[in-house]
Image (cartoon, rainbow, N blue to C red):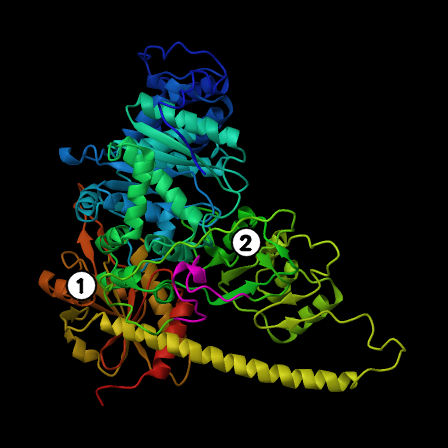
Amino acid sequence: MAALMTPGTGAPPAPGDFSGEGSQGLPDPSPEPKQLPELIRMKRDGGRLSEADIRGFVAAVVNGSAQGAQIGAMLMAIRLRGMDLEETSVLTQALAQSGQQLEWPEAWRQQLVDKHSTGGVGDKVSLVLAPALAACGCKVPMISGRGLGHTGGTLDKLESIPGFNVIQSPEQMQVLLDQAGCCIVGQSEQLVPADGILYAARDVTATVDSLPLITASILSKKLVEGLSALVVDVKFGGAAVFPNQEQARELAKTLVGVGASLGLRVAAALTAMDKPLGRCVGHALEVEEALLCMDGAGPPDLRDLVTTLGGALLWLSGHAETQAQGAARVAAALDDGSALGRFERMLAAQGVDPGLARALCSGSPAERRQLLPRAREQEELLAPADGTVELVRALPLALVLHELGAGRSRAGEPLRLGVGAELLIDVGQRLHRGERRPRPAGPASPPSSGRAASNGPSLCRDPLAPRAPGRPRAQRPAEPRPAGGARTLRPCAIHRPFALRRARSAAASIKLLCRETSSIRSMLLLTRSSTAWHRLSQLKPPVLPGTLGGQALHLRSWLLSRQGPTETGGQGQPQGPGLRTRLLITALFGAGLGGAWLALRAEKERLQQQKRTEALRQAAVGQGDFHLLDHRGQARCKADFRGQWVLMYFGFTHCPDICPDELEKLVQVVRQLEAEPGLPPVQPVFITVDPERDDVEAMARYVQDFHPRLLGLTGSTEQVAQASHSYRVYYNAGPKDEDQDYIVDHSIAIYLLNPDGLFTDYYGRSRSAEQISDSVRRHMAAFRSVLS
């Protein structure tokens, strides 16, 4: 399924491949550096840039002397005129040398490998491949990115795991590689800073698809890693940067050629991206599917791509004699649980609570889903006609999820980590109109995968218990054969962040649906986001000839049927009760069904919350006491808060963005609950993880900007460490700059304590103030003191 290109199998492109001009090598460096307007004019007119020219441009980008308009103009000139092989190699080196170089122990030299993908819909390969390679004896210092458009990047997926910290210093990366064998981190200001600036500019200047810029961006980040081998997954197709295989092949040849010229062994794989990779799209859902693949199960296309890329890396780095042998080793790491073990180590080392990491890696798919962010609503799109599935188009589905909040349109935009889609069908599968198929136990896990099918969470085991020795691994499902000649059907489950409209707006929608031919497009009338659901019309396939497909829309909460042309029989006589009687019966029947559905839903939510609470209690978080000073200088311990509901956050006052945002969200929750009469008050608490700078006076100045009842707690280094350890809070002060300023890396979570002083729940960055308020209300309603 993937064609590999290496220095030995594909010739590097000759100089001039991008600019269309011949090349006899770069000229000697100019003794006098040229000004940026001159460099832009030279490239605009089709000239070649010398090494000094390129390095001068990159230096101006880093030191800030290049204006934004000049950067955009140079990028556009490169996009239109191209760069030859030597120019691209120099640009790659200049970007790589614009920041700190990573240094590793000499013994690791042949072990360091990495993978890069040009992006796709449902591409969660990095989450599986990195720990699988680590289990095979490699060191994988993977520097990943965030996605723009579609459904986010690798870092966004990992941040759906509560506590996962993508910000790691080079020193911390070495510790991670030593402990887990792999790490997946973000690009920092110290590593390739020039590429970070150019990458952001490319996105807003329509130069993302420039071959030399893509090549330099990819390889520069890999050069600083000191790798022995690299594999690049170059996507092509309807949902990829390059729509056809010829353009993707050109990029692959360039990557291989430039990598070889810089002394890096590179293999490039060409893979199609017309349909989603796997069966899940969306951050939390893709994490679940990656865990399933590391269980030895999961969708075959994901597993095959992981083993193909992994086999190429093991072969290039000398860990396997052939690519096939390397692929077999990666497959064995997935089947015997060693890859999953490495993934658990990586999670714990990068800030995830060890109990949560163990639960995610040892629990069933249903149990995992309870521990990750989830969308508020879920809707199953049923088959509108009889037929056989021929194709699932990735791009329309990704655009829908993007507009529902799973993707971002600009850097820094927050994501809805629980939004996503699950494909409930396979290519070649025969479906019937309106058929409701039993849901699998987890994402991309049909009943044949070895897991028992379930319509709800399993309550049979403790999600925080370790994996039992010798637990059998799930078997891979057989991939169905496509059937030709039938129309395309695309049923799936959409996880979305809002509920359906009710009352009059819903009644008006029903009338319109009865008047028009109902289709997936009509779902926009039942939601709050018409633009997003409008794109779902692209997913509706043509119906089979001679059928009545598309005449009805079935939703989980509604049954909307098309009425016949008349209300009389063939002889014009009334049939059955009158219209008013039938409407009354329908209303009463619908009210009964609606009440039963609401009762069942409430009971299901209660059981899920009860299970989550029990799992968190067994994690033994917050069981110890603490002794700190508040911002007024008064001694405080946990017993002082008995009888109160408490929302607690750990952070530091010098935090530039995350801590103020999280505290503002915490305060918003407190205000929402204060506005509801009858609810007990909630005490907001802020505990510092930076006692060196956050003394009593500093805390007093800081908390006054948020809420009059916000309590700031500090203490000695030992006291803060004891309190943080009790709540499983990770924190680590970074290096100091010349002004003795520094940043503290720490876990990001809001903790809820009940009136007994017991830890009850926690909320990560992905949870909104409204979601937290809803959860606190439910805990208040269900609370029964164990001390009285």
Q: Please state which of residues 36 and 404 is positioned toward the viewer in this rendering.
A: 404
Amino acid carrying mark 1 in the image: Glu
Q: Position of residue 731 (x, y in %)?
A: 20, 56
User: Total number of numbered labels?
Assistant: 2
Q: Residue furthest bottom?
A: 788
Mark 2 element type:
helix
Residue 779 image point, x, y percent: 35, 78
Image quadrant where residue 457 sits: bottom left
**Badge 2 or badge 1: first in the primary sequence:** 2
The secondary structure that dominates the magenta segment is loop
Side (left or right) of 344 relative to 491 = left
**What span is in magenta?**
437-457
- Could you tell me the amino acid type at mark 2? Val
Mark 2 Cα-neighbour bin, 10 Å: few <14, some 14–19, many ≥20: many
| Residue 367: quadrant of the picture | bottom left
Image height of 109 relative to 700, above or below:
above
